[in-house]
Image: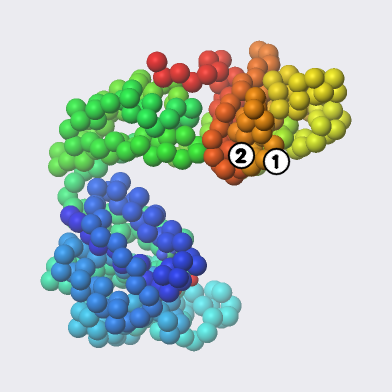
Amino acid sequence: MRIEVLTIGNEILSGRTLDTNFAQLARALEEANVQIGWHSTVGDNAERIGEGLKTALARADAVVLLGGLGPTPDDLTRKAVATTLGRPLRLDEHVLDSIRARVRRLGSKLPASVEAQALLPTGAQVWENRLGTAPGLLLLHHDKPVILLPGVPHEMEALLRDELVPYLGARSGARVVSFTLRTAGAFESQLHEKIGPLAQRWPGATLAYLPSFFGVDLRVTVAGADAQQVEDVAASACGELRALVAPVLYAEGAQTMEQVVGERLVERGLKIATAESCTGGLLAKRLTDTPGSSRWFERGFVTYSNESKVELVGVSREDLATHGAVSAPVAEQMAAGVARRAGVAVGASVTGIAGPDGGSEDKPVGTVFIGVHTPEGTVTRRFSFLGTRATIRERTAQMALDLVRRGLAGLPLEARLE
Ligand code: AMP
Ligand code: MG
């Protein structure tokens, strides 16, 4: 089954709003093994929406239209679909009732025009939108599904998950199982060299390398008509791949590095404090992104100046003068010092040159020292990151979290695939 997606809205065409809805949809459909053959974007113009829909119907097995279901005159999707498919708009009493009930709950602060959202192309099946007033709609045109989803991202996502993926998944008839292994510390090319053509030996499987500054995610999707076989292949593929990338594997599925660090701290009953220079608090931000982090995150300092490194976490002035702020001894003293000052067992520190200026021959931009203090001792590692100021900071925070994870689990500090 190969579908076409039509994103609708002037704000997308002008580049003012990024088409995150399409990205969400594409990822979710990949999991359901529904292939997207075409994706186009159309402005808020009924004629062009109609043209786009006709073109899509001529080549795709199903069409999904995203957006333009609002109550304002620029939201034309329902009207354009009604005209193109020859299904005049009719008032749907049930949808009207639920819009009115919603307006009452909100204290009737919505204009009467929201009721226009109850005008649906004849024969449309309604997918209830619990988060807003515009429902999702399903029409069958000569047995080809035409699906309309609202543009508001969280509404679109809910309908995507609850209705669209199950519907298209069932229609495509395939059983699909997928899993993700998250790695940090190895390049895509290194992983590729290690894994090689392994995926070709798994029937019905595809392996995707998904790099970001958090590392490389390995996503495997197995699809087939035989549910048992799909599950067996996925299970053995997961086992094989896990073993191959074990030295750089930090999480599975959607779990983040900071969640893993939090779990390790809880397991050991320890708390962490941070002292950061070039990341300016990003490490503390990442750690406290996790709900419940107050159980294991004690405090974080942004020790940007030399003076603050001395005053707040007790770095020696002499070492600052001898080795410079970006150095292993300073990272070590920051990590041990912040743990001591905060009265906790674990300390993490970052000191580096995020650029674009400030590099030197022996410490170019991207040179970062990370320190980790645990009950087992204090360690430091030197990194050389490539990228812009922003990406160097992101990579630094990720590798600092990874070093904490390794320190807490007693793993080797350096990720080596061989
Ligand atoms: P609409 O249903 O087209 O009126 O969209 C409502 C709001 O959702 C718009 O004002 C945008 O802020 C947002 N939106 C619409 N389409 C998209 C999209 N493809 N990706 C991200 N946000 C969108
Ligand atoms: Mg719109």
Residue 235 vertical position relative to residue 86 in the rendered view, above or below: above
Quadrant of the image for the C terminus? top left
Residue marked by disc 2: 393
* Disc on the earlier residue, 2 or 1: 1
Determine the secondary structure under disc 1: loop
Residue 77 vertical position relative to residue 7 in the rendered view, above or below: below
At a point 61% along the width and 21% down the height, the residue shown is 381
Kind of residue indicated by mark 2: Arg
Q: Horizontal and vertical percent for residue 138?
A: 26, 69
Residue marked by disc 1: 280
Residue closest to the far front: 361
Quadrant of the image for the N terminus? bottom left
- Quadrant position of residue 327: top right
Q: How many marks?
A: 2
Q: Is residue 298 visible?
A: no
In-front residue for pair 237/267: 237
Q: Would you say 412 lies left or right of 198 here?
A: right
Q: Is residue 353 visible?
A: yes
At a point 17% along the width and 61% down the height, the residue shown is 61
Label 2 CB-ligand 1 distance < 8 A: no
**Is the C-beta separation of discs 2 and 1 under 8 Å?**
yes
At a point 38% along the width and 26% down the height, the residue shown is 190
Q: Horizontal and vertical percent for residue 330?
A: 75, 23
Q: Horizontal and vertical percent for residue 359?
A: 66, 34
Kind of residue indicated by mark 1: Gly
